[in-house]
Each structure stands twice: as C-alpha cells, then as structure tokens.
C-alpha cells in the first residue's frame, strides 16, 4: 500500500467524507488532554459489522437492505485499513533480540517518566555506570515503580523521552534525534529513522521533540547542525502521516530554535522555542488547521529564555511553561499572561481535569524542586511537597495517583516517589 495511505484515504470520495464525520482518525486513541502525555488512551478496535442470518424460503431480501449492509462493510474495511497505518520500513535495532536481564542501576539520568496505568510505567535513561557497555536504555515497571527492568539497551546513544498513545504503540527518542518505536507494548523496539534525516532536500536535520495523535499522525520539532547561532539556530516543524516513516516540513524558522510541540485533535496546536542568547525571548507559534498555517503569538516581557512545552485543559485554556515560569491563556494563545514562578523554571506540568493542574518548579540557587497544585486553573497555587536535586519529571493518572522521579545526588541516588492518600511516599 502507498506510504501516505493514512492521509489519502480521508480525501477521496463523498462516501469517505461521510465516514470521516463519524470516525476521525485524528481522535482515535485520544482520551484527554494532559501534560508531558501523562494520560493515554486505550484504543478500542473498530466494531465489526454483524448480521443475523435466517433461512427464508419464500421471502427475498430487499435490495435496500443489501445496499445498507454493503455500505456498512465498506466503512468497517476502510476504518480498519486506516487504523493499521501502513507500517514503516525499518531495521531491527542493535543489539538484536531482547536485552539481557538487567535491573535499573543507581547511576542514571532520567529523560521523562510515563505511567499508562497504576502498575505499568516507562523510563528512558542515560547510563553512567563505568562497567556497563551501554549508553542508554528504556526500563519498564510492572509493579507501580518499585522495580524496573530493561526492555531496550543501546551502546550508541542516550535515551531522552518515551511516549505511548495506548498500551501497545509507543515511540522513544535518543538524544541525537533517532526514533525507535514499538507495536507490542515495548517487548520489541524497532529503529524508525536514522539519527540525521533529510526533509525536502534539507540535510542534517535532527528531531527534537514529537507528539502523536494516533498510530499514524504526529508532529515534531527539529533542528539542523551548522545553522547560524542567532537566537539558537534554525528550527523546523515537521509532520508525519505514516507513524514516523517519513516527515514533511510544515514550517521553517531561519533564526529560532524550536523545542516543544503540542497538537490537539481539534486542529489547534502550539510550538515553542527561544534561547539563551541576549536577543532571544521566548517564542510561540500557533496553528488552528493541523499545521496548515502557523502564526507567532506574543509573550509578555522581554526576558531571555525558552518555553519548553504546553499543557491544556481544553482547546482554549492552557499553559506554556519553561525557563521563565508559567504563562496562561484563556483564548488559545491570542493573549498569554504570566501566572506563576516568573523567577524560576517550571520543569513539568500535569493537567488532571478541567480545574486541577500540577506544576513542578526548580531553583538553580537552592537546587530544590517543589511541587505545586492549583484547583482553579492557575489562579492560586498551593505547595504540595519539596524534593531534592534533579527531580524534574512526573506522571499523573488522576488527582490521587502520581509519580515523581529524580536523583537525590545527581547522577546517583535514583529515587521514586508515589502519591498515596494525599501524601508523597518514597517507594525506591
């Protein structure tokens, strides 16, 4: 099948257009809006058409009923084809086969933490142990964070992030930009792209971040080595409709590095950037048509820094956060206002429901990381707990179930805290 099957099938006939109104592939596998993809959908396979067959010796089946049955079968067939998302041509990662049995060592650096239910969680890491032949790996827990075991190890790169859209399909990124993916819940990982890939004649492009709406369609930000240093170099917004097999360029900036990307099923999306240079204030791009067009949105103030990512309660009300704290919008970013931590870095945020949101704040002076909670969409913040150095990553399932991971003494002392009965308990 054609590699662009996922996107092409939605643009053909009136019959397909009718089907699109009832089964939008962009919303398949999407449960709700959350920070750093902390909540993930359990995709349900399309329902199969069934019909009771009865023996009739005298009555003939009306032609109209047969037509309706054929239309239903056609719709189910097309839906199943689209959700399968023509798999990328890939090569098996090194080393071949499953990794050797290995529990999580103490000397690591964490990319992010992601729990998909109360027991199963994922952790991409950098490995620092001198006796280990590996640089990075992906570790999994099946007991809520008490123990972690390697599901993927590599000698070539350090792992920086992992994201799942359901219990089976997930992607992970190496620091250098290469992406691996799984279709069997992380039992096997396959390399999806080279470290440096080409887009429309441009070479030397590395993927910085990505976000998938379903098994087929995703967006990412990328950068290119050798760009001028003005405001952090150049940046790209890229888009895939075949699960990452190929990427097309959506947007190009000749003088801005792009960092986070956030896309909603409604078609509204945001891209962040900025830099540490004197003339590089935070930078936000916005689209309302799935990346068809991008417009810059203004952030108050003129301080330097980078907006790292976004978290939204709905398509209008959300947050942008990073080196200059948290900005808030109630109109999809037409206006952004400073809401908290303007003198410190907001490392992570987690949307719980339409009102409740968590934020993890870090200080470069005290090296303490503090968790805050707001029950009124960021109007006021209440301190929840204080953690040690390098506790920058968290994952929530709801307001009473969450995890925070980090190092007590970086890069050693890997520690896991879990929220239980409104208290944070050290479980590792």
Image (cartoon, grey):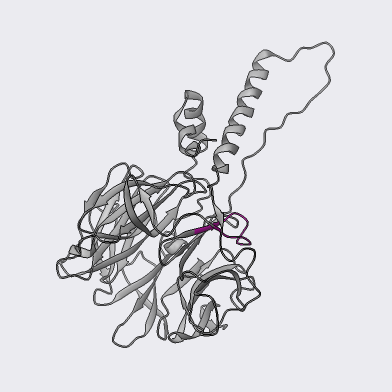
Residue 28: percent from left, percent from top: 52, 45
User: Is the residue 99 above or below the residue 387 in the image?
Assistant: above
Rendered position, 410 above or below 379: below
Main SS of the magenta part reads loop
Whether residue 422 is visible here, answered yes or no, is yes
249 versus 8 height, above or below: below
Residue 310, given in percent of the width and then of the height, sits at 35, 61
Stretch of the chain drawn in magenta: 180-190
* Most foreground residue, 135 or 323: 135
**Residue shown at 50% from the left, 84% from the top:** 107
Q: Quadrant of residue 425?
A: bottom right
User: Which residue is pictured at 34% across the width and 59% down the height?
Assistant: 318
For the C terminus, the image quarter is bottom right
Residue 126 position within the rendered picture, expressed as x and y whole percent measured from the top left: 47, 75
Residue 199 magenta? no
Quarter of the image with the N terminus is top right
Whether residue 315 is visible here, answered yes or no, is no
- Residue displayed at 19% across by 64% down: 231
Q: Position of residue 146 (x, y in %)?
A: 61, 79
């Amino acid at each position: 099948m054609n590699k662009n099957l996922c996107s092409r099938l939605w643009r053909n006939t009136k019959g397909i257009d009718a089907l699109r109104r009832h089964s939008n592939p962009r919303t398949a596998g999407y449960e709700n809006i959350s920070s750093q993809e902390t909540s993930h959908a359990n995709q349900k396979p399309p329902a199969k058409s069934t019909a009771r067959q009865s023996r009739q010796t005298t009555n003939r089946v009306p032609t109209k009923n047969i037509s309706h049955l054929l239309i239903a079968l056609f719709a189910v067939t097309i839906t199943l084809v689209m959700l399968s998302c023509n798999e990328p041509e890939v090569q098996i990662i090194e080393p071949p086969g499953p990794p050797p049995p290995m529990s999580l060592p103490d000397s690591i650096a964490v990319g992010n933490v992601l729990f998909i239910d109360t027991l199963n969680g994922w952790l991409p890491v950098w490995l620092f142990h001198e006796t280990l032949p590996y640089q990075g790996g992906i570790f999994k827990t099946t007991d809520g964070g008490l123990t972690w075991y390697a599901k993927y190890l590599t000698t070539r790169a350090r792992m920086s992030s992992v994201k799942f859209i359901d219990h089976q399909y997930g992607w992970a990124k190496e620091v250098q930009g290469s992406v691996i993916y799984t279709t069997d819940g992380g039992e096997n990982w396959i390399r999806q792209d080279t470290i440096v890939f080409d887009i429309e004649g441009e070479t030397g492009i590395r993927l910085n971040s990505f976000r998938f709406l379903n098994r087929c369609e995703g967006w990412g930000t990328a950068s290119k080595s050798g760009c001028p240093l003005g405001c952090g170099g150049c940046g790209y917004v890229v888009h895939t409709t075949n699960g990452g097999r190929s990427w097309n360029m959506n947007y190009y900036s000749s003088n801005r590095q792009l960092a986070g990307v956030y896309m909603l099923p409604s078609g509204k999306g945001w891209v962040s950037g900025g830099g540490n240079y004197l003339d590089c204030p935070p930078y936000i791009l916005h689209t309302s048509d799935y990346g068809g067009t991008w417009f810059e949105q203004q952030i108050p103030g003129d301080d330097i820094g980078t907006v790292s990512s976004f978290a939204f309660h709905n398509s209008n009300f959300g947050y942008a956060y990073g080196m200059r704290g948290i900005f808030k919008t109630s109109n999809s970013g037409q206006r952004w206002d400073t809401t908290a931590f303007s003198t410190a870095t907001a490392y992570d945020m987690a949307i719980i429901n339409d009102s409740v949101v968590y934020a993890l704040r870090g200080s470069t002076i005290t090296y303490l990381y503090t968790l805050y909670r707001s029950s009124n969409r960021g109007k006021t913040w209440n301190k929840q707990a204080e953690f040690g150095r390098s506790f920058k990553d968290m994952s929530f399932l709801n307001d009473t179930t969450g995890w925070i991971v980090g190092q007590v003494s970086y890069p050693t002392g890997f520690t896991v805290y879990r929220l239980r009965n409104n208290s944070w308990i050290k479980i590792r």
